[in-house]
């Protein structure tokens, strides 16, 4: 379990103090894939660097499995970092070492004997699906392959936590999906807690179970991914959930009830879901907003549907839509509608 | 002045001098250059590393006065013209080698002139390194010394070799200058025969040899820098 308590970080520049993080409180449970999302400059990278003390917080504590990381001496901190490893947007492989030696690198730093290190590195190459790249140099690999090597390197010291700092931001959507699959697989098979820093909602949608939305150095919203997606409360969350801005989303008509349908990797079907519902259940939904996309064989994104103000119809629609795998349906909160109406006036 | 340079008697005289003096001169030039470069690297490499690692945000921060002093000393040494430096360090040379004349003696001022230059070259090589790589090593629990010896230096090898090539060719130029105050080598021949005794053909041959040596050093250096750089290998498994 990772606890961040009253965490603050300010940077002093020549003529001002910048508060990058302001009183952050988060609890990340073991086994979570925890998303921390925010626009650029929200403080995400600083936050993740506070967890392994690459950035020393100005105030507050980072507690990993009961150990207060800020109180560790240099040696103990280095040991801790072997258990809390990190992957980066730019992969950051050693360009003058081949892939095998890149994976061996953290073991070399920990003075693991050569033969054990080599065996472990070869195993990891298998895990990340690149067993034939041992002798290749990073410059000979594609971005996705380089990130796989970086993941193998991060796993070499058997960490319990993996920090991913915009790990897929430099990759194309297909490769992003593959890397996220790998991270999810690692999380499940090796029960490693994963913290994912990203500015892409799709990344959070795809693999995270919980999410914190960071806005201007503070946690604007925190909860399970489906909760936050279904009914974003804060402005920052709304901006991320409806990238085209909340204002431009058509307001529900007077007396209309709205359901948010979140597609979290649901299987692509040949029949169009909403049209099918109209035919099967004779419920005509008003599509107020939709942003979905297909990645691999899953659908991701969300949709806002308007229904007549009738408990029976809403219940039936909810039941019909939830029948699909990977689909979460939530009725949007009245205050959200209130807000909309106020804005419309 | 060069009109009779290729007169038959001048040519035969030059051939005689070439055969009698040049083999030794060539050897002296090479060993003064290589030995001075070696000493200069031994001093300059650690200094260059300290200049980068010792910074406030570096991996091994030094007290700022240490870093400032280092920078000032390097700048002072670098701003003294080599000809003057050779004269200034004569007492040091005497103390170290026992004499201030000869090829071995010239290694002292050559090394002193070259090590601050090499420190600056090493500094610039190490600064080219992507700072994210260092942060990554830190995130894995690398100690400052591990970062220096396992990341900063190995990752900079191609650039360091390119810069050492620049250094060795520059030092070769300095060895020629050391001929003026009694250093041996091709420089001495060029000055003694060409400048003092008007045997321009001999001087020309010495200069041509120096040019050839620079070409060879540069070619070998470039070859090694490219060959050892794993970033520019052709992509065999392009996807």
Image: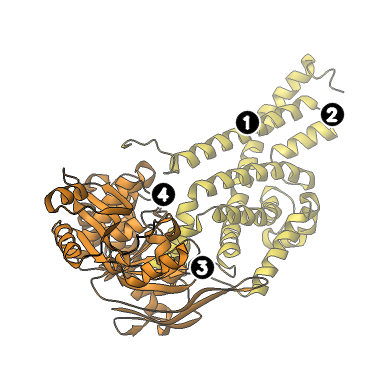
Query: Residue A311: x and y, percent?
Result: 19, 67
Which of the chains bears the disc numbered 3? B
Give whichever of discs 1 and 3 has the lower sequence position: 3
Q: How many marks?
A: 4
In this view of the protein, which residue sits in the foreground, A318 or B182? Answer: A318
Real-space CA distance between mark 1 and mark 3, rounded to the nearest whole angstrom: 42 Å
Q: Residue at x 57, y 38 (%)?
A: B217
Chain B shown in which color? yellow
Q: Dividing the picture into quarters, in which one does residue B67 lie?
A: bottom right
Give whichever of discs 3 and 2 has the lower sequence position: 3
Residue position for label 2? B198
Residue A96 is tagged as 4
In this view of the protein, which residue sits in the foreground, A246 or A300? Answer: A246
Secondary structure of residue under mark 1:
helix
Real-space CA distance between mark 1 and mark 4, rounded to the nearest whole angstrom: 32 Å
Which of the chains bears the disc numbered 4? A
Chain A shown in which color? orange
Residue position for label 1? B212
Q: Are marks 3 and 4 in contact (CB under 8 Å)?
A: no
Residue B59 is tagged as 3
In this view of the protein, which residue sits in the foreground, B151 or B36? Answer: B151
Mark 3: few/some/many CA within 10 Å (<14, 14-19, 20+): many
Real-space CA distance between mark 3 and mark 2, rounded to the nearest whole angstrom: 57 Å
Residues marked 1 and 3, same chain: yes
Q: In screen coordinates, is A163 left or right of A245? A: left
Real-space CA distance between mark 3 and mark 4, rounded to the nearest whole angstrom: 20 Å
Instruction: Name the front one of labels 1 and 3.
Output: 3
Residues marked 1 and 4, same chain: no
């Amino acid at each position: 379990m990772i606890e961040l308590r009253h965490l603050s970080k300010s940077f002093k520049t020549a003529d001002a103090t910048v508060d990058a993080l302001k009183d952050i409180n988060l609890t990340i449970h073991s086994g979570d894939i925890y998303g921390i999302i925010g626009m650029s400059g929200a403080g995400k990278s600083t936050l993740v660097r506070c967890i392994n003390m690459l950035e020393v917080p100005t105030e507050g504590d980072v507690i990993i499995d009961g150990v207060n990381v800020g109180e560790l001496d240099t040696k103990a901190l280095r040991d801790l970092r072997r258990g809390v490893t990190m992957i980066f947007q730019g992969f950051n492989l050693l360009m003058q070492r081949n892939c095998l030696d890149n994976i061996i690198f953290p073991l070399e730093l920990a003075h693991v004997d050569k033969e054990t290190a080599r065996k472990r590195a070869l195993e990891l190459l298998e895990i990340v699906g690149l067993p034939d790249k041992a002798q290749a140099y990073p410059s000979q690999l594609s971005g996705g392959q380089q990130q796989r090597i970086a993941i193998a390197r991060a796993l070499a010291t058997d960490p319990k936590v993996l920090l991913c700092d915009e790990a897929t931001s430099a990759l194309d959507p297909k490769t992003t999906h593959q890397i996220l699959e790998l991270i999810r697989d690692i999380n499940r098979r090796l029960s490693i807690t994963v913290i994912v820093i990203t500015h892409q909602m799709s990344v959070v949608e795809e693999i995270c179970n919980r999410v914190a939305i960071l806005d201007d150095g503070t946690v604007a919203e925190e909860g399970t991914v489906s909760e936050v997606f279904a009914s974003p409360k804060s402005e920052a969350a709304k901006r991320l959930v409806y990238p085209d801005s909340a204002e431009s989303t058509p307001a529900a008509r007077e007396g209309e009830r709205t359901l948010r349908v979140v597609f979290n990797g649901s299987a692509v079907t040949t029949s169009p879901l909403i049209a099918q519902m109209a035919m099967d259940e004779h419920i005509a939904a008003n599509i107020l907003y939709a942003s979905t996309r297909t990645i691999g064989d899953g659908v991701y994104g969300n949709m806002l549907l308007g229904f007549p103000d009738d408990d029976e119809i809403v219940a039936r629609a909810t039941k019909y839509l939830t029948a699909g795998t990977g689909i979460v349906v939530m009725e949007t909160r009245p205050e959200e509608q209130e807000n909309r109406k106020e804005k419309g006036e | 002045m060069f009109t009779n340079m290729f007169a038959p008697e001048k040519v035969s005289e030059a051939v005689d001098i070439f055969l009698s003096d040049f083999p030794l001169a060539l050897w002296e030039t090479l060993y003064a250059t290589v030995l001075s470069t070696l000493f200069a690297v031994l001093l300059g490499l650690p200094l260059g590393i300290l200049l980068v690692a010792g910074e406030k945000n570096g991996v091994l921060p030094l007290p700022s006065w240490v870093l400032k002093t280092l920078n000032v000393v390097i700048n002072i040494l670098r701003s003294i013209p080599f000809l003057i430096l050779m004269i200034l360090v004569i007492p040091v040379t005497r103390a170290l080698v026992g004499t201030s004349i000869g090829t071995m003696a010239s290694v002292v001022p050559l090394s002193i002139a070259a090590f601050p230059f090499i420190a600056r070259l090493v500094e610039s090589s190490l600064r080219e390194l992507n700072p994210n790589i260092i942060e990554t090593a830190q995130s894995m629990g690398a100690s400052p010394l591990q970062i220096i010896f396992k990341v900063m230096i190995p990752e900079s090898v191609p650039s360091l070799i390119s810069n050492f090539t620049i250094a060795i060719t520059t030092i070769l130029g300095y060895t020629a200058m050391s001929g003026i105050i009694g250093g041996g080598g091709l420089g001495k021949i060029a000055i003694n025969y060409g400048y003092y005794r008007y045997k321009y053909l001999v001087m020309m041959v010495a200069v041509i040899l120096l040019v050839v040596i620079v070409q060879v050093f540069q070619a070998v250096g470039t070859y090694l820098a490219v060959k050892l750089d794993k970033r520019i290998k052709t992509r065999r498994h392009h996807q």
